Image (spheres, rainbow, N blue to C red):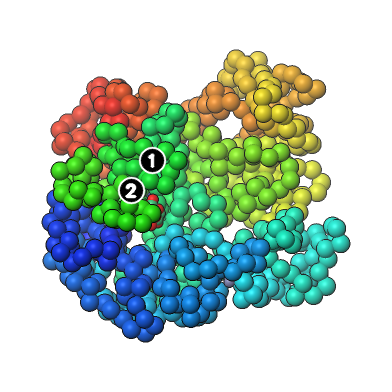
Amino acid sequence: MTTKFPPINPRFPHMLHGGDYNPDQWPEEVWAEDMRLMKLANCNAMSTGIFSWTHLEPEEGKFTFGWLDRIMDMLAENNAYAVLATPSGARPAWLSKKYPEVLRVREERLRNLHGIRHNHCMTSPIYREKVRIINTQLAERYKDHPALLVWHISNEYNGECHCDLCQDAFRAWLKKRYNNDLDRLNKAWWTAFWSHTYTDWEQIESPSPVGELYQHALNLDWKRFSNEQTFDFFLNEIKPLRELTPNVPVTTNFMGLFPGLNYPKFAEYVDVVSWDSYPVWHTTEADWRLGAQISFVHDQNRSMKGGQPFMLMESTPSNTNWQPIPKLKRPGMHMLSSLQAVAHGSDTVQYFQWRKSRGSSEKFHGAVVDHVGHEHTRVFQDVSDLGAVLKKLDGVVGTSVRPDVAIYLDWENRWAIDDMQALGRGRRNYPETVLAQYLPFWKRGIPVDVISEEAEISSYKLVIAPMLYMLKPGVAERIRAFVANGGTFVATYWTGIVDETDLCFLGGWPGGGLREVLGIWDEETDTLTPDERNSVLPAPGNELGLTGSFTAKDYFALIHAETARVLATFGSDFYAGRPALTVNDFGKGQAYYIASRNDEDLTDAFYGKLADKLDLLRALPVELPEGVTAQLRTDGEKRFIFVMNFNPMPATVDLGAVHYRSLVSGEPVSGMLALGAYGVEILEG
Ligand code: GLA
Ligand code: ZN
């Protein structure tokens, strides 16, 4: 099966390398030097104009594009490209002053003053109109400019607004969602509870700490609405760009696992996914553990558009000044963490920022060009070295991977879990629970897709549903069909509890038809104190071959094996002997149920057994040392294997008898592959 996608923009079939570029903060004398340095750093793409609105429109209707014209020309003269931004991420003060409706209202119903950024009302017709005008101007002016490669829409959209315009829009959205039927909404939201039944649409208000707070279905629908207002705002932004520059791809930079925006839904509206990654390496947590977390997010970004390569829109070349510990990247980490993004499907490595700003809040943030102003710095050299490697990766551009494994990470499910009053506070840790199931695959170099509930799953061998509390319409049906047709499914405790408006399934959990697939009935769930433990004891002679004794914590589903076979039981408490791990045959497939939150050793042993049993696709057919992973990109014929050592000391990987070629050195590689501290090798073969 081919896994080759076109380049982000076919005009440039190479890896993009560059960063946020703010020449409007600097005198013109600096610009020529920027171009000289850009070439030395092996950079070819500059994200320009992200917060430039006041420089482009200093007064309402008065446009000053001269400086940007010169920058665009200089980029083109130097064979570089602009990832050109629309400036809505920060608005001019004149706009807020003249049209206060653009200022966001907080949930306490307090209107913000003008300041900082990323905080406009998504509904305001005036703001939308002003954005449409400036975006049209930009597109008209640069539509034929050779430097225009990608549109960078706004910046890191986030947040919500509770103004009257938004309240009206919310009610209109609800009317549409509930078919103009208030009774239907009341039933879906279970408003008879505490006498909260609405008798008029006008009574509905967004959630607020000074108003309605515990109406979980309202909270969910408000989040859905705020998301859709953001998508709609985005669509308003790109309308003139679509008309004037139909061949220039649009993206907007996502923020990894930021909870506020349902990125898999947002991804439907962009041409290419991009995200901003700011891990803090070298802290008390082993770097390889953080490495696995970041791999997980990269995989999530690749999975959103069916494996299509994404963009690493921002990362720091050195430290991230706003993080609690703004630690410098140790030697090797810049190359490793950048190629890690590529390994998981990025066709770019980009930074915040190109030139370190002289003043204001980001003057101490890592940048390619430091305040010293020349190229003779460690960081500049790291960036330049990486750029030299990226130039050798033309063959990797557009390639991807089709994993055998998918894990659900669903944003709406996360909202519901975070908001519910169950399982105690501070330990529900939904994303961490998903990550815990991912880790065994990362350690084995087994590629994984990270998918939302809406995703199609028929092509996978193994689908994992950790804490899939909320089953939206169609999900259980897809899982049933998947298993019936021979797929292997794994669910954990706290799966299949509520429907999409947070109404509990009646008649026995897991609901929606999953009870039959899993062959168990989940009667109750126990929550232990943080320091309590129970044990999980594999049944003698169990069909997975699990042996020993394992530790479990936090959550315990007290289940009945109905048609399922019991693979392990709990060791103590009043539910000693009850099933802890089960498997059920359903149609041609099998469905496993993990009834407790288990320590890493059991999770690793369990998925290790499944990986062997199902013969899952691996990047390398060998065992990897701790802290080393291997990831795969392929066009269906050529295979590019990224072998990455996240340890601060060297590691060796036994490649066996297979012969590869290094894309970095061009030399043949076989036998024992030695990786230095934070070392990375890209093998073709
Ligand atoms: C975000 C923003 C950038 C910059 C960086 C700093 O990702 O998009 O404008 O503020 O953080 O890390
Ligand atoms: Zn508003």
- Is the residue at mark 1 in contact range of ligand 1, meaning its CB lies under 8 Å from it? no
Could you tell me which residue is drawn at 18 percent across and 58 percent down?
34
Q: Position of residue 122 (x, y in %)?
A: 53, 70
Q: Quadrant of the C terminus?
A: top left
Among numbered discs 2 and 1, the one appearing first in the sequence? 1
User: What element does badge 2 sit on?
Assistant: loop
Residue 640 found in image quarter: top left
* Labels 2 and 1 touching (C-beta < 8 A): yes
Asked whether, in this view, residue 368 is left or right of residue 341, the answer is left
Q: Is residue 478 visible?
A: no
Identify the amino acid type marked 1: Pro
Disc on res. 326: 1
- In the displayed structure, 52 sits above or below 488; it is below
Identify the amino acid type marked 2: Phe
Ligand 1 quarter of the rendering: bottom left
- The residue singled out by tag 2 in the image is 364
